[in-house]
Image (cartoon, grey):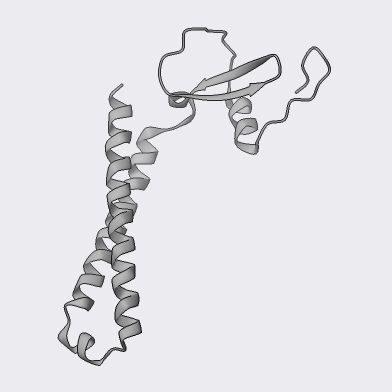
Amino acid sequence: MIDHNKQVLEFTKLEKEMLSMLAKIEINNNLQGELLVKTFQGGSLSVLMSDIVNYEEELIKLAAEEKRLISEVSRSNKMLNNKGFMSKAPEKKIQNERDKLETYQVQLETVKSRIEITKQKMEK
């Protein structure tokens, strides 16, 4: 894309894909909502996130990830509550499983938060 001053504007791959998906361009100085903004010399380009993100698809992906993480947390808890494993496994293996459990729990909370945020965006 070239501006009137013959300067080349550089866009990331995502930005190029977004621009190519636009069926029309509308000039509007009163956009309301979450925006993706690309600034350049002499101006900026703003796109509503709701125009480029399919929140229903995002929610489906997040629900699948939540299900996977719940399964991993359950598996780790069972392993760490298994007396046979705890008595026979080397301390390094036990600590590794504790670390994985902690990571899964943090990831699960993050996914749950993202699900709530996505649901709120779908309501708007």
Q: Position of residue 99 (x, y in %)?
A: 33, 69
The part of the image, by quadrant, that contains residue 87 is bottom left
Closest to the observer, 98 or 54: 98
Count of numbered marks? 0
Task: Identify which residue, 43 or 115, lies in the foreground.
Answer: 43
- What residue appears at the point 25 percent right and 64 percent down from the top-left corner? 73
116 on left or right of 9:
left
**Position of the C terminus by quadrant:** top left
- Residue ranking furthest to the bottom: 88
Residue drawn where x is 31% and y is 55% of the image:
106
Q: Position of residue 14 (x, y in %)?
A: 60, 36
- Residue 44 appears left or right of 99: right
Figure check: 56 above or below 27 = below
Q: Is residue 72 above or below residue 33?
A: below
Q: Residue furthest right?
A: 6
Image quarter of residue 23:
top right
> Can you say which quadrant of the picture contains the N terminus?
top right
Q: Position of residue 39 (x, y in %)?
A: 63, 22
Question: x, y percentage for residue 2?
Answer: 78, 20
65 to the left or right of 34: left
Rendered view: 41 above or below 58? above
Please say if 86 is above or below 104.
Answer: below
Name the residue at 20% across, 71% down. Answer: 77
* Residue 81: quarter of image: bottom left
